[in-house]
C-alpha cells in the first residue's frame, strides 16, 4: 500500500506543476514575439557558416512549466533575432548541449531532459535531421559538449544519467562515421553536472571547469582533455574561477581566451566574468563597469566576425527568467546591453525551483519504475 501512495503522490506533484512539456507551437501561438521567449537551460552556439548565433530549446514557466523546441538566430550586425520554423526538428527540451562543427558546417545537439537522440543542423541548408546511431551515451541532463576540430569529433562529459546519478563517463561522436563511442581514460574529473567545456585552439585541448559533484559540492577545478591521446589532465592554474555550477563558457578565437560568465555560488547567482588564458594557464576575473544580472543557465557564444561574445536569456535566482541580449568585448572589457537598457521580462514566479524540478522528474520516474518492479517480484 505504501508504494501505491508514493506513486500517487508523485503523480499529483507532476500533474499539478504541468510538467508535461507543451510544444513550442502551442505556446507561441498565443505569444507573438520578435525575439525568443524568456528562458533558461537553452543551448547557444555561433554558426560560422551563416555568421549568426543560434539557440535551441530551454525551459519557460509562464503559465506552467514547459520545455521549448524553437530555433532562433541572432545577427549582431543587424541586432535582430529571426525565428526558423523548421520541420523536422528536435523535440522540446532543456539542459541539453550543442556544438558547432566547422569541418562539416553543422551543429550537433545531444541530451537534455530524458531524451537520447542525436540531431544535426545543416548550416548550409538550415535544416534539422536526426542522426540514427548504432549506440548513444544514454540519458545525460546538464551535460557538457565540446568539438575538437583536429579529430573532427564531439566530446561529451558529465551530467545526470538515466538513473538520476551523476556521471563521469566520456563519449565521442565521430562526425565522419556518425556514431558514438564510449571512451575509458585512466584518469578523469569527479562526476558532476552543470560544468562547462570548450575547445581551446591555442593549446589544442578541451578545457573543462565548474559543476556540482555529489561529494564535494561546487567546483573551481580546471581540467584539459586531449582527444587524440584520450587523456584528462588536472591543471594548477594561477588563479581559479569561482566554485560554480551552471555558468556558461565560450571560446574567444580572436583573442584566444575562454570567456566564462555567471553561475551559482551557494544559493546565489553571480554576474562575474572570468577569462582563462590556456597558454599562460591563468584565470583572471574581469571587472567591467556594467554586466548582465547574475544568472545561471544562460546562453553564450562567440562571434569571431565582430569579435564579441553574445549572451541571451538565463535564470535569475528567485526572480525568474530573462530574454535579454548582451555582448561582451574582451579587448575593451565592456558588456553592452543590445536592447538599450530595456526592462527585463520576468514571468510569474512558479513557486518552485524549476532547475531542481527538471532534475527531480526523471529521477522520480526511474524510482517509480524500480518500485513497480520490486512490487511485481514480491
Image (tube, rainbow, N blue to C red):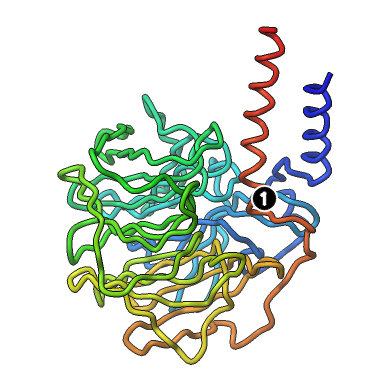
Residue at the image point whose x is 60% and y is 49% from the top: 69
Residue at the image point whose x is 32% and y is 86% from the top: 331
Relative to 123, say whether 138 is above or below: above
Q: Quadrant of residue 179?
A: top left
Q: Tell me if 258 is positioned left or right of 93 in this view.
A: left
**What is the x, y in percent for residue 365?**
66, 31
Instruction: Between residue 169 and residue 40, name the one nearer to us.
Output: 169
Q: In which quarter of the image is residue 362?
A: top right
Q: Tell me if 139 is positioned left or right of 286 in this view.
A: right
Residue at the image point whose x is 20% and y is 45% from the top: 231
The reply to whether residue 28 is visible in this rendering is no
Q: Tell me if 250 is positioned left or right of 368 in this view.
A: left
Residue most toward the bottom?
289
Quick one: quadrant of the C terminus?
Answer: top right
**What is the x, y in percent for residue 228?**
16, 45
Q: Tell me if 12 is positioned left or right of 27 in this view.
A: right
Residue at the image point whose x is 29% and y is 56% from the top: 223
Instruction: Between residue 101 and residue 169, name the one nearer to us.
Output: 169
**What is the x, y in percent for residue 182?**
31, 32
Residue most toward the front?
215
Q: Quadrant of residue 123?
A: bottom left
Tally of numbered discs: 1
**What is the x, y in percent for residue 106?**
35, 50
Local crowd size for mark 1, using a 10 Å CA cut-off: few (<14), some (14–19), many (≥20) = some
Instruction: Between residue 2 and residue 164, name the one nearer to us.
Output: 2
Quick one: quadrant of the N terminus?
Answer: top right
Relative to 118, say whether 85 is above or below: below
The reply to whether residue 307 is visible in this rendering is yes
Q: Mark 1 points at which residue?
A: 24
Element at label 1: helix
Amino acid at each position: 500500500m505504501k508504494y501505491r501512495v508514493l506513486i500517487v503522490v508523485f503523480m499529483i506533484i507532476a500533474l499539478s506543476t504541468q510538467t508535461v512539456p507543451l510544444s513550442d507551437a502551442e505556446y507561441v501561438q498565443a505569444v507573438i514575439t520578435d525575439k525568443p521567449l524568456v528562458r533558461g537551460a537553452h543551448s547557444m552556439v555561433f554558426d560560422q557558416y551563416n555568421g549568426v548565433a543560434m539557440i535551441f530549446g530551454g525551459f519557460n514557466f509562464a503559465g506552467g512549466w514547459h520545455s521549448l523546441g524553437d530555433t532562433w538566430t541572432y545577427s549582431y550586425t543587424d541586432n535582430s533575432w529571426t525565428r526558423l520554423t523548421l520541420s523536422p526538428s528536435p523535440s522540446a527540451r532543456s539542459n541539453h548541449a550543442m556544438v558547432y562543427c566547422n569541418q562539416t558546417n553543422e551543429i550537433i545537439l545531444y541530451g537534455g531532459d530524458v531524451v537520447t537522440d542525436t540531431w544535426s543542423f545543416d548550416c548550409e541548408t538550415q535544416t534539422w535531421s536526426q542522426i540514427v546511431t548504432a549506440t548513444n551515451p544514454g540519458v545525460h541532463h546538464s551535460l557538457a559538449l565540446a568539438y575538437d576540430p583536429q579529430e573532427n569529433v564531439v566530446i561529451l562529459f558529465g551530467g545526470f544519467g538515466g538513473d538520476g546519478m551523476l556521471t563521469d563517463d566520456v563519449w565521442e561522436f565521430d562526425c565522419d562515421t556518425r556514431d558514438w563511442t564510449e571512451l575509458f581514460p585512466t584518469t578523469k574529473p569527479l562526476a558532476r553536472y552543470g560544468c562547462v567545456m570548450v575547445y581551446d585552439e591555442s593549446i589544442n585541448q578541451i578545457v573543462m571547469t565548474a559543476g556540482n559533484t555529489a561529494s564535494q559540492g561546487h567546483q573551481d577545478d580546471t581540467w584539459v582533455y586531449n582527444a587524440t591521446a584520450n587523456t584528462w589532465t588536472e591543471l594548477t592554474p594561477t588563479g581559479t574561477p569561482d566554485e560554480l555550477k551552471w555558468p556558461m563558457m565560450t571560446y574567444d578565437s580572436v583573442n584566444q581566451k575562454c570567456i566564462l560568465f555567471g553561475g551559482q555560488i551557494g544559493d546565489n547567482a553571480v554576474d562575474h566574468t572570468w577569462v582563462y588564458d590556456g597558454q599562460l594557464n591563468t584565470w583572471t576575473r574581469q571587472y567591467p563597469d556594467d554586466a548582465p544580472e547574475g544568472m545561471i543557465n544562460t546562453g553564450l557564444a562567440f562571434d569571431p566576425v565582430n569579435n564579441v561574445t553574445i549572451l541571451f536569456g538565463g535564470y535569475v535566482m528567485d526572480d525568474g527568467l530573462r530574454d535579454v541580449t548582451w555582448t561582451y568585448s574582451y579587448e575593451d572589457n565592456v558588456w553592452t546591453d543590445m536592447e538599450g537598457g530595456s526592462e527585463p521580462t520576468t514571468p510569474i514566479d512558479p513557486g518552485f525551483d524549476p532547475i531542481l524540478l527538471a532534475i527531480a522528474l526523471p529521477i522520480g520516474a526511474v524510482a517509480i519504475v524500480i518500485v513497480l518492479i520490486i512490487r511485481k517480484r514480491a
